[in-house]
Amino acid sequence: MSDAIVQVRDLTKSYGDVVALRGVSFEITQGEIFGLLGPNGAGKTTTIEILEGMRLADGGTATVCGLNPQSGGAEFKRTIGAVLQSTSLPDKMRVAEALSLFAQLYGRRADTGGLLGRFGLEEKRHAFYGKLSGGQKQRLAIALALVNEPQVVFLDEPTAGLDPQVRREIYDIIEELRRDKKTVLLTTHYIEEAERLCDRVAIVDHGQVIAHGTPRELKQRSAGTTRIEVSLAHAAADGDLRALEGVTDCRAVDSRYVLHSTRPPQTIVALVKHLESSQNELQSLEMAAPSLEDVFIELTGRRLRE
Amino acid sequence: MNHAWTLTLFRLRLAMRNRAFLIFGIIIPLAFLFLFSAVFASKGGPAVAYVLASVLAMSVMGSFWGLSQQLVIFREQGILRRFRLAPLDAGTMLASGIFSNLILMVPGIAVEIAVARWVLHMDRVGNLLSVFVLSGLGAVTFAALGLVVASVANSMMETQVINQILWLGFLLLSGVAIPLPSLPAWLQQVALFLPATYLVTGLQRALIEYVPLQRLGGEVASLGGCAILAFFVCRQIFRWEPEEKVPRQAKLWVAAALIPFLLLGAWESSRGGRLGEARTILRSTFAERPAQQRDAAAPPPGEKR
């Protein structure tokens, strides 16, 4: 018997001719922050909305705390909290009113003051929703997701479209959920978000989980290599760069070349020599330890945000 | 029920913060009351009650505008999907819209009656219980019809087109804008198939002839039946998400809901009493005035003497 609190088995879903999910499976255990990482259109939102009970899967099974999202009714709704990707509140609704209203709908007395303080919204207590900034709206959305003290929290792209400062504030809030031992399913296309926040990550592409594990495990795929990203004045044949000393992998991405090398200094020297001999020119060069983006590129040949 | 009341209070607060409530709920109906009175009842008297019945019916029928547009805005902006996450069902969401609409309508109706009585010198206020019960039933009926429109329409533009068509139909055929007896005979028969007609004739009888509630069984039954049916249908076809399609079975429900009106219209048409009552009220209202007043006031449009 699995101790998974969220279980997803072979989920399939199509919208007309468009296949959104092609057999997605994963499990999330109690207190874990699990990330679905993938580009737009990969099937992340469809998966999370099936788990929230907002969409019906064509096939496969999904349970949250042993409850079926479609038939779990009010008991299921009291178990989960969610931040939806596309949602809103009436412009003329005040912040404190929103918290109080949703608490009442869950049959609870809202600790409005506590939630406002926790999410840095005390000063906006009487502000209309329509007057809030994007970051404030998102913090309110997370506060609303927690108003019923759920066991499982679903966060669908919680930082999409927010500036880096606000994104970091949201990261702090999610870290707090970890301390509160909440089980969290997070979708994102931000690498740093998945690396920083998630205990385990499933990389999703074209409606399939193409890899999963802890961020460390996934990066192990590129273990012992350094990522060298270069742009050249003229296109180079992949084979030429792949043949450079120390290079284990080379891919052309966005008119740049991403090389993985076990011996970076030798690779760079060999690259410069190769460019001189082929009358090409180096326009930029960046080096970094491999990230989840590299894992994604390795698996799909594309960047996450293409 | 608790949730319905919680949401009703929330919707009331939102409405009170919206200038449109003051404009469409109070100011515009009063403007029509003054305009119609100036044209058809410049000397006061029972003609003011006739005009008031039309304006009250217009205020009540206007229920479907606001509520249908609000539901579509809520759906298009993703507000409904936020509520969908809470332990709520569609019926609760819809009922709260209807309750709040009903409560918001009461002050407007009261102001219109007070202005007619004390500013426009309406000689009698009619049977107030009948007026308020019919107005309330009408508000529920037309609000539920508005919710049906919102559930069928896929966008705000579609909602406005459907609302315009229905609104014009109700306004022109029910006796609000043109007295029922002034319509061509075949259009009078068509009017008998509209719930709006029962609201207008009921309000005329309550305001002008003091008809008590127990003698307004036909009007109460038709409006009440329509309210229950419309609520049932809008609950069947309610959509939380903009991209959800109305199921084919739900469209059949909309069609099936028309059957009772066809039966009611056919029954009233064969009985012939309602049109006769409408003619009697119109004649007696404008004949009751002294000769000098009757000469001064324009005859109701299209009425053949």
Image (tube, helix red, strand yellow):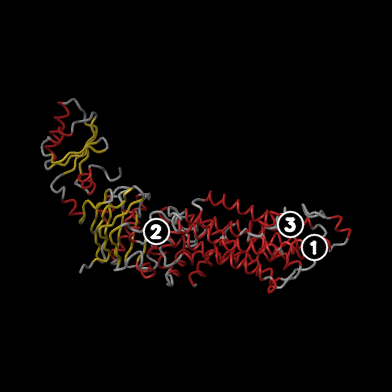
**Element class at badge 2:** helix
Residue B288 on image: x %, y %: 84, 64
Observer-nearest residue: B261 or B111? Answer: B261
**Element class at badge 3:** loop
Observer-nearest residue: B150 or A36? Answer: B150
Give the label, 2 or 3, closer to the camera: 3
Return the residue at label 3. Answer: B179
Crowd class of label 3 (few under 14; some 14 to 19; many from 20; radius 10 Å): many
For badge 3, the amino acid type reads: Pro
Mark 1 to mark 2 CA distance (whole Å): 63 Å
Observer-nearest residue: B112 or A158? Answer: B112
**Residue at point 51% right, 65% down?**
B232
**Element class at badge 1:** helix
Asked where in the image residue A305 lies, by quadrant, the reply is top left
**Residue at point 71% right, 71% down?**
B128
Asked where in the image residue A75 lies, by quadrant, the reply is bottom left
Mark 3 to mark 1 CA distance (whole Å): 12 Å
Q: Are circles 3 and 1 on residues that touch, CB within 8 Å? A: no
Q: Is residue A163 visible?
A: yes
Q: Which tag, 3 or 1, sits closer to the chain's start? A: 3
Mark 2 to mark 3 CA distance (whole Å): 57 Å
Return the residue at label 2. Answer: A139
Residue B172 on image: x %, y %: 68, 53
Return the residue at label 1. Answer: B285
| Residue placed furthest toward the right | B292
Do the residues marked 3 and 1 share a common chain? yes
Q: Are circles 1 and 2 on residues that touch, CB within 8 Å? A: no
Do the residues marked 1 and 2 share a common chain? no
Residue B41 on image: x %, y %: 79, 58
